[in-house]
Image (spheres, coloured by chain):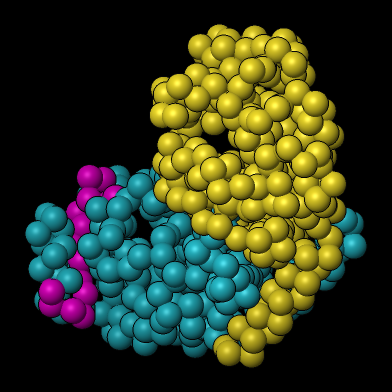
Chain colours: A cyan, B yellow
Amino acid sequence: MPAASRRTAIVGLGLMGGSMALGLRDTREVRGYDVDLSTREAARGRGIATADSLAALFPADVVIVATPLEAVVPTLDDLAPLAGSAVVVEVGSLKRDVAAYAGRAPSGARIVGLHPMAGTTESGFGTADPAIFRDRPFLVVATARSDDDALAETEAIARELGGRPVRCSAEEHDRAVAMLSGVPLVAALALARAGEDVAHLAGPGFAGATRLAATPPDLARAILRGDRDNVKAALARFRRALDEVERSF
Amino acid sequence: MPAASRRTAIVGLGLMGGSMALGLRDTREVRGYDVDLSTREAARGRGIATADSLAALFPADVVIVATPLEAVVPTLDDLAPLAGSAVVVEVGSLKRDVAAYAGRAPSGARIVGLHPMAGTTESGFGTADPAIFRDRPFLVVATARSDDDALAETEAIARELGGRPVRCSAEEHDRAVAMLSGVPLVAALALARAGEDVAHLAGPGFAGATRLAATPPDLARAILRGDRDNVKAALARFRRALDEVERSF
């Protein structure tokens, strides 16, 4: 089926889901849902068709789950009796819990993990912008409920958004993200704290190095607490690299 | 004397000196010198008047020393017999050695430290752009050979470039810069090293956090080796802050 005819539902219309809705509506029949009424209204204001409940998103060929991280598995569970043969693509930033959920999901479920390595320190539909996806890696993570067609559909979504799909396992994903998102966030928070008394004298180097300290606290907690073991292991590698660099000068 | 009549010599026409030449030529009578002939030609190609020797820069009212850091004190020494009553403003990124030099400089010398907290990871006249100075702090450091008029002239230069002059001592300067430039550089180098195997999966957060790893090696060495004790002390503060952030999640 060509993408243009794909009925593509998006659950959660924040920065990520909203940007996907705006980026996919030219190639797909997009309909969005968000638990927050004013977010649905804002989406409609920018021409996104919306539904007023999860159930009203169906029938659909693909459902993209773009809720806050802690709501991803509960949403997958809510979708189980509704989704039928639709491919469910969740775009959360950690995959271990999704992998575990998929292992116990109904046998007819079709679940794929996708993580666009894109974003800003802003949040909410008002900041949505499909340009954030251009040329970014999209990590594609197969689950116990993924099939070849579902994976191909997920990669097609990544490409339609201008991204580069890269397959990896849930374990590889979470380890990589601990280093790529967790450590930079911790380093930015630590640098902002250590340099607080001289920040008013700073130039662009320090400003850039502390930019991620502006990450919304709920997202920061999700990144750091959601995968504490991998983040701690990645931080240990970072500390060893700090020692090596310090010894070299 | 109004700035427009100020004969302002600039020694060293790289990113910093070149950007200052381009930024000051509308308000001052600017003449530049660089030891590198092709750099002088490039500057002339963009309308900067140049001299073919240090001596040929004089007479001048102000001399800005914008050489690489290791050449700053030798250049101040070369200027001593030439500068007369000109205000010598050096814009290096460390001030301890300048403070020591000023303490033993001829009694008629007028030397002020200035550090525009601005720059990029690029270098050379070809990358010069006066826009880098806009709204940046310019740290103004008095020496044993500074007087009120020399300090006022230095602050005027900062303002003409669109910056915000802030006075501090050489010691305060070097301690602040160790945290604001040294630690972010070490952290970026360490993160690039620790995350090397997953960098191809990275989004904008990691890319931003490792941007300073592209600092030219000679500048990186100057920042890190030129002030090893302060950088090591600042790194110790950064490590403690890392521990605190890690304990908080």
The reply to whether residue B29 is visible in this rendering is yes
Query: Which residue occupies the foreground of this view, A25 or A6?
Result: A25
Rendered residue at 47%/40% (across/down)? B156
Residues rendered magenta in the picture: A23-38
Against B146, residue A116 (above or below) is below
Against B63, residue B49 (above or below) is above
Rendered residue at 58%/42% (across/down)? B150
- Total residue callouts: 0
Q: Residue furthest right?
A: A247
Query: Which residue occupies the foreground of this view, B222 or A138?
Result: B222
Query: Which residue occupies the foreground of this view, B87 or A237?
Result: B87
In the rendered image, residue B89, in percent from the top left (x then y), is placed at: 64, 38
Q: Residue furthest front?
A: B107
Q: Is the C terminus of chain A in the top left, top right, bottom left or bottom right quadrant? A: bottom right
The reply to whether residue B222 is visible in this rendering is no
In the rendered image, residue B134, in percent from the top left (x then y), is placed at: 43, 43
Query: Does A25 sit left or right of A215 as displayed?
Result: left
Query: Does B122 sit left or right of A58 as displayed?
Result: right
Query: Does B61 sit left or right of A43 as displayed?
Result: right
Q: Quadrant of residue B87?
A: top right
Query: Does B13 sit left or right of A76 as displayed?
Result: right
Query: Which residue occupies the foreground of this view, B93 or B60?
Result: B60
Rendered residue at 24%/65% (across/down)? A125
Against A84, residue B83 (above or below) is above
Rendered residue at 73%/37% (across/down)? B108
In the rendered image, residue B186, in percent from the top left (x then y), is placed at: 74, 59
Q: Would you say residue A31 sits in the magenta stretch?
A: yes
In the rendered image, residue B66, in percent from the top left (x then y), is placed at: 67, 33
Against A1, residue A49 (above or below) is below
Q: Would you say residue A211 sits in the magenta stretch?
A: no
Q: Quadrant of residue B241?
A: bottom right
